Amino acid sequence: MIGNRIVMGVLALAAMSSCQSSKVKISGRLVGSDARTVYIEQVSARGDKALPVDSVQLDDKGNYGFELKKIPSTPTLYNLTYDGETVPLLICAGDRLTINAAGSLARNYTVVGNEESALLREFNRAYVEGAEKLNDIAAAYARAESDEELKRLAKAYSDEYLHVKQAQIEFIVKNKSSIAAVYALSQRLPGDRYLFNGPGDAVYYRTVADALEERYPESPYLASLYAEISQLEALQTLTSEIVESGFPDLEISNMYGEKIRLSSLKGSVILVDFWSPSLGNSNALNADLKELYDKYHDQGFEVYQIAVETSKPTWINTVQEQNLPWISVCDLRGEASSALTLYNIRKLPANYLIDRKGDIVAKDLYGTSLEEQLNKLL
């Protein structure tokens, strides 16, 4: 996904540290829960795993202590976990951190001994509170019975969402030259991919990148930040290229490297289909779709199928093994594909049906439902 690759992709900043010792001590007191074990884990370089490092038991008064050895002299992201809640820490060799909490760790913890960890705490606590409010509103929405109540809760959810995002923007701008700002860019709210993944959000990535480049010109974060900026700006270009008929246009390469525009199919009935070659049900879904394609293709039915994949061999082999007859394209960005954002795809498989006029008339149609629509449109 977009933000995680930035924040977790590189967690070392050589220019930030003047530490001498490779040891780190983390201690504190946690009270208000029956849980007795505290865990520390290191986030992997790619950000896709949290690797266990150590665990300790609280004493009778809730005190605990870790001593970590061979810690890099550059800041590294760790998680402290207690009673099912996790808080992020940026740890540097030589640090002496004190982390205390009464009750909820995520909501009430304090941290002393590392400036970046203190900034993360400032951001994380407000963020957790906002996410909890959104969850509460969503739960109330699911129980609501009247239209009036549904409308009120929908507005409350939208207002809170905007409040959380505005708070994040303020934090990022205020702390734009810190690693904590990069971390804040990556965080997501319930039901969303990431809070900063729209075409207009490139400005926030650029704000942080420019500040880091001035303060830490050797920072390995910069390459990842600028890569994300390029992707978001490309998405902005795509958004500006909405065809006159109303659907978002795409231009993605097929397996031969030829770029194919979705709008080149205008005048046909088009199924824009998003799928993953790695999903176990892809063969069955494509088999059903092939039957409909064979039946309706001569009448003007086209399929523009977008593979959500990062491995070109996996994609090509699957297309060839399944003998897919339609247009198959892939930008090899996986879940980071701008096409997913442009079409608001949150789960796979997914599709949109576009009529001959270029209007989107239905989504997520399969089997009989898709055939009924094709019969009407053709």
Image: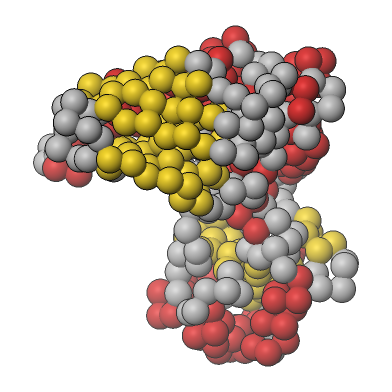
Image position of 306 with respect to 72: above or below? below
Q: Nearer the viewer, residue 21 or 265?
A: 21
Residue located 53% across and 43% down the image: 42
From the viewer's perspective, is 330 left or right of 356? Answer: right
Percent of width and height locating residue 59? 22, 33
Q: Nearer the viewer, residue 178 or 363?
A: 178
Residue 275: name its quadrant: bottom right
Residue 263: name its quadrant: bottom right
From the viewer's perspective, is 337 left or right of 14? Answer: left
Residue located 53% across and 48% down the image: 344
How many numbered badges does the structure rendering display?
0
Image position of 86 with respect to 250: above or below? above
Percent of width and height locating residue 147? 18, 36
Residue 36: name its quadrant: top left
From the viewer's perspective, is 48 left or right of 218? Answer: left
Residue located 71% across and 51% down the image: 249
